[in-house]
Amino acid sequence: MEIQFPSPLLSAAAVFFSTLIFLAIKSKLKTRKSTRNLPPGPWKLPLLGNMHNLMAGLAPHRMLANLSAKFGPVMHLKLGELSVAVISSPEAAKQVMKTHDINFASRSSIIVAEIISYGCTSITFSPYGDYWRQLRKITTLEVLSAKRVQSFRSLREQVFGDLARRFAATEGSPINFSEDFNSATYALISRASLGDGAKEQEALLPMLKELAELSAGFDVADVFPSIRLFHVVSRLKRRVMALHKEVDRILEDVIHQHRVAKSGKSDDQSKHEDLLDVLLKFQGDDLDFSLTTDNIKSVLVDMLAGGSETSSTTVEWAMAEMLRNPRILKKAQEEVRQVFDGIGYVDETHIPELKYLKLIVKETLRMHPSLPLLLPRKCGETCEVDGYEIPAEAKVIVNGWAINRDPRYWKNANTFEPERFLENQVDFRGSNFEYIPFGAGRRICPGMSFGLANVELPLALFLYHFDWKLAGGMKPEDMDMEYGVGVSARRRTDLSVVAIIKRPLPV
Ligand code: HEM
């Protein structure tokens, strides 16, 4: 969550320029005694506010958790001109995402998000209202429904099966598990969303990755929205616009190919219906709610960006935690092998029998939620949380990572213990506010079932066919279990492992 200044010279100019403005308005403000009951927070520098507090080089959720430990579960920060409320307890999260859900149901946007979501028209970034409700309805009932998730079963088995075969082919040699698994998950989401035909799909991956990295920070124009100069000179904005242009060109091309295919032969029953096919059905003058082509592209970006990294980070952390805890790895392998030894391969229909694996996934999502700060909300009207005033328009960050480790709710909160969920029946569907890996309330993740399917199947496959070791003779206790500095929970160091075949893979 670093602030991106256009250049060192401009950053100096920015401070100087801003100081002048500050001095000009200071005397005016001095006379107006504040009666606001803002949440506590660290001391704020003139103009920059708390920007210096977020430059410690740690993952943002860690920096915010450290600050909240000092200032409380409802904390106020100022980033330039932006007011930010940080929520770090289940009780306060419940007030934001249940009691006052509608008031916090819009997203707080940043420049990058505005550009890549076609002016905030995606499911993720569109403001709460009629348009979002209609889009969300289509998503829940059609695009990401249980039936649709199920329809991608053979695609999932093919993509992750191919990856397992690649691991088998390099048996005994080090594998960059993080990179390989991330690419496979992206391939799955991309084929599910855009179909198999699009030649340029692969080119999207590095661009989406770069966009995700760029959206990890605030541009200086985001924190000083009133200073137009920053919007004009922003290097970040220029780079995002260039990437977006290229992503847009590829998506236009894929949409064109789909339209041509549809008009040429609609009776090809063998063709797998992808998410773009589904979305195109919601275009037409005779419909009550019709999607424009830009709306469709924005939803496709939602799927590609929101569906890949989230699931792949979860699998990466689950593997890392199991490798660090050989007892858990062994127990999980015994269960998977007991269930599948009868048929000799992993078949998705038997995944519900993997009770222990499901506990591992739950515990991974508790300790390493892929979006540790969920997706920031915006406060509609001034509102009270925990007795403090949250100003209208404030950005509201719910620190799900800190909440999922709240020691008042979780014994040995920082230890990976899947068995804790045998006694503790809390689930992640949004009604237990001490456990919110998918968020809660109206904006809860609509891709939960799809995400879980994309996590459980590959884990079962990997545990069934292989034994695993850390590469380079590394000992479990020496593993780096720290996060990178982005907004997702990616590992700081890629997971490097060695696979040893224990059950042959079907050809
Ligand atoms: C393990 C997998 C996943 C995790 C942990 C996860 C987590 C989240 C979280 C925390 C949010 C924000 C919720 C809130 O603000 O309360 C979210 C929103 C969202 N997720 Fe997921 N997600 C996952 C998989 C997916 C998949 C597979 C897709 C689609 C292919 C997806 C699409 C979305 C969308 C579109 C939103 C925005 C919803 C809205 O604003 O109305 N997610 N997700």
Image: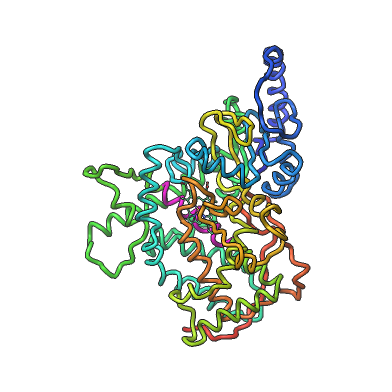
Which residue sits at x=67%, y=19%? 34
Residue 300 point in image, percent of width and height: 42, 52
Q: In this view, does 422 lie above or below 208?
A: below
Q: Which of 54 and 61 is in front in this view?
A: 61
Left/right placement of residue 257 relative to residue 233 reads left
Which residues fall within the magenta stretch? 298-313
In the drawing, does residue 402 fall left or right of residue 465? right
Q: Where is residue 76 in the image (x, y as percent from the top left)?
A: 67, 34
In which image quadrant can residue 385 be found? top right
What kind of colouring is applied to the model shown? rainbow
Q: Is the magenta stretch mostly helix, strand or loop?
A: helix
Measuring from the top left, give residue 250's x and y in whole percent: 42, 52
Identified at 74% across, 38% down, the residue is 71
Q: Closer to the camera, 399 or 497?
A: 399
Q: Is residue 342 visible?
A: yes
Q: Quadrant of the N terminus?
A: top right
Count of marks overlaid on the render: 0
Q: Is residue 299 magenta?
A: yes
User: Is residue 23 part of the magenta span, yes or no?
Assistant: no
In the rendered image, the vertical position of residue 6 relative to residue 242, given as above or below: above
- Which residue reaches farthest front? 423
- Whether residue 114 appears in this view of the structure is no
Q: Where is residue 168 in the image (x, y as percent from the top left)?
A: 57, 80
Q: Residue at x 71, y 70 (%)?
A: 324
Task: Out of 311 and 190, give the one closest to the viewer.
Answer: 311
Question: Which residue is nearer to you in this view: 292 or 16?
Answer: 292
Identify whether 87 is placed above or below 499: above
